[in-house]
Image (cartoon, helix red, strand yellow):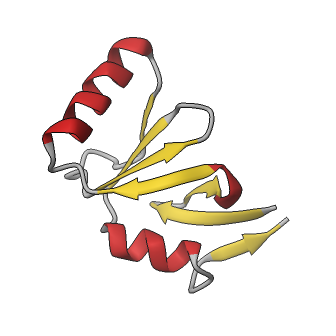
C-alpha cells in the first residue's frame, strides 16, 4: 500500500483516492456540505483554509490545506510517499 502525506503529518492510502478537486466550485461546496450532514467529512486542514478536497472510493471527503497540484504531485510519485 502507498500512503501519501496530505499535510500536517496526515497520510491517506493513495489507492482509495478517486479525485482531488478545488473547493471553490458550487458543486464541490454542496458535496462538502452534504458530506458534513452525513458525517462523511474528514477535516485535516488544522484550522487553515481548505485548498483541496479529496474524494475517496468509499464516499469519504477529506479536506486538506495543501494545493491540489501539491497533492496530485505527491500522488504521482513525487515527494512524501511511504510504502507499507
Residue drawn at x 42%, y 46% is 44
Q: Quadrant of the C terminus?
A: bottom right
Looking at the rendering, in which quadrant would you find the N terminus?
bottom right
Q: Residue furthest front?
A: 27
Which image quarter: residue 56? top right
The residue sitting at 42% across, 13% down in the picture is 38
Is residue 7 toward the left or the right of residue 5 in the image? left
Q: Position of residue 9 (x, y in %)?
A: 54, 61
Is 41 on the left-hand or right-hand side of 28? right
In this view, which residue lies farthest toward the right?
84
Depth check: give the residue in front, 32 or 48.
32
Determine whether, in the image, residue 81 is placed left or right of residue 19.
right
Q: Nearer the viewer, residue 50 or 48?
A: 50
Q: Residue furthest top?
A: 37
Image position, residue 27 (x, y; %): 21, 37
Against 62, residue 72 (above or below) is: below
Q: Is residue 41 above or below residue 64?
A: above
When the figure is inspected, residue 1 is found, relative to residue 39, above or below; the finding is below
| 82 shown above or below 65 | below
- Going 59% across and 78% down the picture, which residue do you hit? 80
Answer with the quarter of the image where residue 76 lies.
bottom right
* Residue depicted at 66% across the width and 49% down the height: 16
Question: Residue 74 location, x and y as percent?
Answer: 53, 76
The count of marks equals 0
Amino acid at each position: 500500500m502507498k500512503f501519501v502525506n496530505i499535510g500536517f503529518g496526515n497520510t491517506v492510502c493513495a489507492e482509495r483516492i478517486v479525485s482531488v478537486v478545488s473547493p471553490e466550485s458550487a458543486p464541490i461546496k454542496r458535496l462538502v456540505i452534504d458530506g458534513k450532514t452525513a458525517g462523511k467529512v474528514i477535516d485535516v486542514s488544522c484550522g487553515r483554509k481548505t485548498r483541496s478536497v479529496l474524494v475517496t472510493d468509499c464516499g469519504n471527503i477529506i479536506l486538506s490545506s495543501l494545493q491540489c497540484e501539491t497533492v496530485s504531485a505527491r500522488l504521482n510519485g513525487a515527494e512524501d510517499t511511504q510504502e507499507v
